Every structure is written in structure tokens, then in C-alpha cells.
Image (spheres, rainbow, N blue to C red):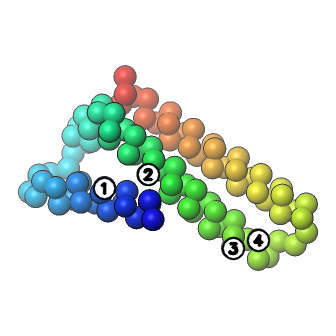
């Protein structure tokens, strides 16, 4: 539900909040200097990562048998999620300085 709310807010603000305004890289970079936008972006990516990796993990659990293999799979998905999130945070560093 939170992902849907963040997605709706993102779409509304970016595309319908200022009709006729062209979305530019500069405008997006300026928006990231504001803490509210930065927090919303981070929350949205965290939610999307969790939702997508958990869904993929759930699908694969139907095909993976054995508790040991399932624990290994869980650890791989946790590591991938943490890695992707860290990469995303590093990609934001030029915008928050």
C-alpha cells in the first residue's frame, strides 16, 4: 500500500502537479537538495527493491526444495537488496552535496 501511495504521489507531482512544465535533469537535481524529496525518493526505492526482490524470491521458493537451499536463497536476496540500495545511495551523493 505504501508503494502505491508513493508511486501516486510521484506521478502526480512530477507529471500533473505543474502542467506544461518540462521535466529536466536540472530541475530534478534541484529537487533532490530538499530533504522531503530526498526522503521520498529513498523510501520509494527501498519499497520497490523490497517488493520486487521479495516477489522474485517467493516465485523461486516454489522451485527450490530443502531448508538449506532456501536459506541460501534468502541470503542472496538480502545481499542483492542491500547492494542495490547502497549503489542507489551512492548515486545520490552528487545531488546532496
Give the vertical position of 13 relative to 39 (above or below): below
The first of marks 2 and 1 along the sequence is 1
Disc 2 to disc 1: CB gap under 8 Å = yes
Compared across the picture, whether 56 is left or right of 74 comes to left
- Mark 1: give few (<14), some (14-19) or many (20+) Cα within 10 Å: some
Q: From the top left corner, tell me how far across and down residue 39 is, in percent.
A: 40, 40
For label 4, the SS is helix
Mark 3 to mark 1 CA distance (whole Å)? 28 Å
Residue at mark 3 to residue at mark 2: CA–CA distance: 23 Å
- Circle number at residue 44: 2
- Picture quarter containing residue 4? bottom left
Which x, y percent locates residue 83?
63, 43
Mark toward the start of the polypeptide (3 vs 2): 2
The picture places residue 61, in percent across and down from the top left corner, at 76, 71
Q: Residue at x 32, y 62 (%)?
A: 8
| Residue for point 65% across, 67% down | 56
Q: Earlier in the sequence, mark 3 or mark 1?
A: 1
Mark 3 touches mark 4? (CB < 8 Å)? yes
Q: What is the secondary structure assignment of the residue under circle 2?
A: helix
Q: Which residue is mark 3?
A: 59
Residue 31 percent location from the top left of the image: 26, 38
* Residue under label 1: 10
Please indicate whether residue 68 sits to the left or right of residue 25 in the image: right
Q: Are marks 1 and 4 in contact (CB under 8 Å)?
A: no
Q: CA distance from mark 1 to mark 4?
A: 32 Å
Q: Residues within 10 Å of mark 2 (few under 14, many from 20)?
A: some
Q: Nearer the viewer, residue 92 or 47?
A: 47
Q: Which mark is residue 63?
A: none
The image quarter containing residue 16 is bottom left
Q: Which mark is residue 61?
A: 4
Amino acid at each position: 500500500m505504501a508503494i502505491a501511495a508513493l508511486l501516486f504521489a510521484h506521478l502526480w507531482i512530477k507529471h500533473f502537479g505543474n502542467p506544461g512544465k518540462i521535466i529536466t535533469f536540472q530541475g530534478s537535481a534541484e529537487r533532490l537538495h530538499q530533504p522531503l524529496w530526498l526522503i521520498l525518493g529513498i523510501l520509494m526505492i527501498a519499497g520497490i527493491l523490497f517488493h520486487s526482490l521479495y516477489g522474485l524470491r517467493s516465485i523461486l521458493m516454489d522451485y527450490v526444495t530443502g531448508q538449506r537451499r532456501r536459506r541460501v536463497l534468502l541470503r542472496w536476496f538480502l545481499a542483492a537488496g542491500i547492494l542495490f540500495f547502497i549503489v542507489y545511495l551512492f548515486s545520490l551523493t552528487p545531488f546532496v552535496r
